[in-house]
Image (cartoon, helix red, strand yellow):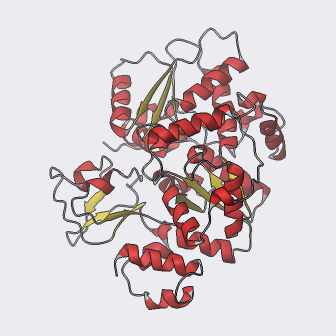
Amino acid sequence: MTFNELYSELLNAAAGNGSHPYSETLREHKDHTGIDCLLHPSMYAPVWRTKPCDCGGDEAPGCVSRCIYSAIVRNPDGELVIDKDRCVGCGECLEACASGVLTASRDVLPVLDAVKNSKGPVYAMVAPVTAGQFGNVSMGRLRSAFKSIGFAGMVEVALFADILTLKEALIFDRKIKSDEDFMLTSCCCPIWIAMVRRGYARYMSKIPDSVSPMVACGRAVRQMEPSAVTVFIGPCLAKKAEARDRDIADAVDFVLTFEETRDIFDAFHISVEELKDDEKEHSSKAGRIYGRTAGVSEAVRETVHRLNPNRRIEVRAEQADGTKSCRELLQRLQEGKITANYLEGMGCEGGCCGGPKVLIPPEDGKCYVNMYGKASPYETPLDNPNVRELLQRLGFNSVESLLRDSIFTRHFEELAVKFW
């Protein structure tokens, strides 16, 4: 039995569609080499090796040479393995592997187990780029889909992108006082953060001390419901690695890609477009456009202008998307060839719309993200009463108190490491 066949059989059994009960199916395959990865994905890197790989040395074509983080190494027996501590989940190796034996990790089985057996409520937390990925359906219908499986609810992470936009706008207004000052973002992209952290550590102090919207959402849910199980859903393998980072591992229990989520919907025979519309959260345009290239810098620029319309120094942004473009941007910064004061990096071409596990073409994803943004009745988080209400529920007595908080803060300077 292949790894994919094992995955499919266990998923269908967990959904009640198998020829045998789930527990019996597990016993039947307890000796399969891939079973431990599927049951305990957090023990492994975001990319799994399903069979021996023979892509050769660093100069040979294949996954070894494609990995800029040197995460594919040889163990004492000479076998190529993936170093869990080095792999950031960028996904570059998946198509590059000449042996074709690499696959993305999957959190599906432990998520379904949590939905069925957890003592606390299980919440789906969907990325802003979710718009359009499961068809031309509203977020309300998607919420109904998750509830029909057994989730307690669904939270739109765009609302927390609003909060982080507001925080970064406040930091920019406070810190950028001369034409020589600059900031690096986006904290929402773990590939970009890993690149700065490991190759350009001298600039870690230039990253605003904001957690990603995913982490902000998970921590907020946990603060309001301490027993909650949090499941982030997006297009990104790197979010699986981010969720396990020691300093923020308190926020998110599991990460599902859009492909994994589609697998669950298919196993449960869910047609999202036929479900009722269960609308709730309302984020601003600023938080909703995070999913595309330039979305973060556009959101911060508009919010800074609303915050302080008479500022002499405005946000002058430059963006890079894709690992090659991001490295080129950082290299030009190092060489003193940058005039922008707000540098946005996203590890995938097109931003999250071009993530490795999107379900629709990146250009279509960008269109849906833009439509999702335009549909909001609010332009910026400063205009959004839902942001103020949520902050009050979380104990913030003013917008400025975001600069003194701990729930939405990450200390990037402490994460700097010398790597390349």
Residue 243 location, x and y as percent?
55, 56
Most distant residue in the front direction: 274
Residue 269 location, x and y as percent?
59, 70
Query: Tag count in the figure?
Result: 0
Q: Is residue 250 visible?
A: no
Q: Which quadrant is the N terminus positioned in?
A: bottom left
Residue 335 location, x and y as percent?
33, 21
Q: Is residue 335 visible?
A: yes
Q: Which quadrant is the C terminus positioned in?
A: top left
- Which one is nearer the viewer's eye here, 356 or 326? 356
- Seen at 33% across and 62% down, the residue is 82
- Seen at 71% across and 19% down, the residue is 306
Above or below, comparing residue 371 to residue 415 in the picture:
above
In the rendered view, does 380 fall on the left or right side of 200?
right
- Which one is nearer the viewer's eye here, 67 or 112? 112
In the rendered view, does 98 fall on the left or right side of 196?
left
Above or below, comparing residue 204 to residue 241 in the picture:
above
Residue 30 location, x and y as percent?
44, 87
Answer with the quarter of the image where residue 261 lies: bottom right
- Which one is nearer the viewer's eye here, 144 or 356? 144
In the rendered view, does 247 fall on the left or right side of 119?
left
- Which one is nearer the viewer's eye here, 390 or 376? 376
Answer with the quarter of the image where residue 159 lies: top right
- Seen at 41% across and 52% down, the residue is 88
- Seen at 73% across and 35% down, the residue is 402
Above or below, comparing residue 415 to residue 13 in the picture:
above
